[in-house]
Image (cartoon, rainbow, N blue to C red):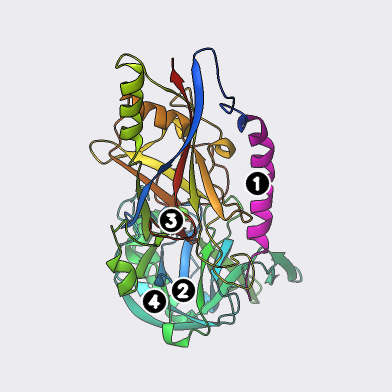
Amino acid sequence: MPQTKYYIYSILATFTIIFASCQKSDLIGLDNGSANGKSETITSAVDIATVPEDSVVTTGVAQHPFGFLKDPVLGETEANLALAFNLPSSAFSFGNDATIDSVVLVLKYGNELYGDSISNYNIRVAELAEVFPKSASSSTTYYSTKTWQSAVLGTTKQLKAFSYGDTVRVQQIVDGATDTTKKFAPHVRIQLSASSIFTKLKSALAVDSVTNFGFQKNFKGLYLTLDQAAITNKGALTFFDLASASNFSGLEVYYKNKTTAGALDTNMALFATNASLAASNVIHKHPTAVKANEGNVNVSEVYVQPLGGYRAKIKFTELEALKALVSKTAGENKTITINRAELVVPEVGESNPLANTYLVPAPRLTLYRTDIAGVRQPLPDNAVQMDPRYLSEPLFGGFYNSKTREYRFVVTSYVQDLLTGRLKEFDTFIAPIRANFTGVANITGAGNTARRAVLAGKTNTNSKVRLSIVYTKPD
């Protein structure tokens, strides 16, 4: 059963904005002549190849990946999750006579599920065998390739599906009054071995109950994986939101203390986690045929995959010929003016990507370049607040159009700079990102979405990546 409602609504909203914004700009440079020369339109070929993506940061991100996905094109992706926890308060104590009732790991869902929405899972919870984070500042950066050391805790949660769209009702403890039931945003609740966790927590608190880092050095946290043999259907990757202001994730520890009258009073202490105390280890197992095509431009399909998977490297192979043509006809001291340049990137994955499939194309791609040192840099058209020629996110583009099955980028200033020599093309890349507007250039690898895309390669007989240029040649 596909999970496409959120995807469709977000893309429709995005393209309403883009369509309204682009109506006027599409007329630029389409006249047949001007006072300074004649405007012409050409379509230039573009080389494109699949190349491995860099590892991505998975701490401090908007949402953290978790799960296991069987992709019929790109193979298997596994995402495991490491978690550390904060003290409920400074110098926290359960009290001398506390007895444990239950311990529940609570993780609030993010807003994406990519894969089969009806797969079943067994979540395995282990104890971390290394200190996380490494410093008291909680600002240690961890990447998707980080391998975590853990010891089996012996806890398994059977889950019928990643129900990231379903709210959860939870009984709330009210001190001195009748408990109530409250509705919470969608989340996972994993019942842990109460006595084992309680013993470990008390032992850690006995060593240092004053600072978070002191506590974290002694209670090293938890590590979540999936029992892959128990997964039904195709599996999926989901995300946990540990960064928003509404995050309520952590260890809920329910315990009892005796009151002054001798009665037992139930309490709940939350050892909270957050985006800085979580990191995902992502493992891609690409098929041999896909790996064999890495770096090859003479293929029919090219792949872009977030979470440290793949990106596409492109080359504007005919720009030098255009520059030479203009120089030959107009003189070396003259140059052409690019009225509009648009990169068109066809998507060729599914015959009908929005119907009856569990892997819809990425809703948005980004486009960036690298400098002589290989450092990522925004294109001038996308250099938000860095270049006066930058465009708004809807105008720059990169959003998927399900009707044309294309992604389009406006690269007018970039092409102009390449032709004039203001910039040199070292490498230019395409990669998936989340669909939401951010107000920045979006050139870093995406660790907060799982949606990938299959793009047209150079030998594709139906469609090809192309650069459409409207330019004015000097008289």
208 over 3 or under it: above or below: above
User: Could you tell me if the residues under marks 1 and 3 are in contact, i.e. CB atoms within 8 Å?
Assistant: no
Query: Which residue in the protein does label 2 denote?
Result: 69
- Residue 345: % across, % down: 48, 50
**Separation of marks 3 and 4 at Cα, in angstroms:** 23 Å
The local secondary structure at tag 2 comes to strand
Q: Can you tell which mark lies on residue 126?
A: 4
Residue 324 appears in which quarter of the rendering? top left
User: Could you tell me if the residues under marks 4 and 2 are in contact, i.e. CB atoms within 8 Å?
Assistant: no
Mark 3, other Cα within 10 Å: few <14 / some 14–19 / many ≥20: many
Q: Give the residue at x 55% y 82%.
A: 120
Quarter of the figure with the N terminus: bottom right
Magenta region's main secondary structure?
helix
Query: Which residue in the protein does label 3 denote?
Result: 447
Q: Nearer the viewer, mark 2 or mark 1?
A: 1
Q: Earlier in the sequence, mark 2 or mark 3?
A: 2
Q: Nearer the viewer, residue 437 or 187?
A: 437
Mark 2, other Cα within 10 Å: few <14 / some 14–19 / many ≥20: many
Residue 418 appears in which quarter of the rendering? top left
Q: Give the residue at x 43% y 56%.
A: 447
User: Could you tell me if the residues under marks 3 and 4 are in contact, i.e. CB atoms within 8 Å?
Assistant: no
Q: Which residues are magenta?
A: 1-24
**Separation of marks 4 and 2 at Cα, in angstroms:** 21 Å
Q: Can you tell which mark lies on residue 15?
A: 1
Q: Nearer the viewer, residue 377 or 270?
A: 377
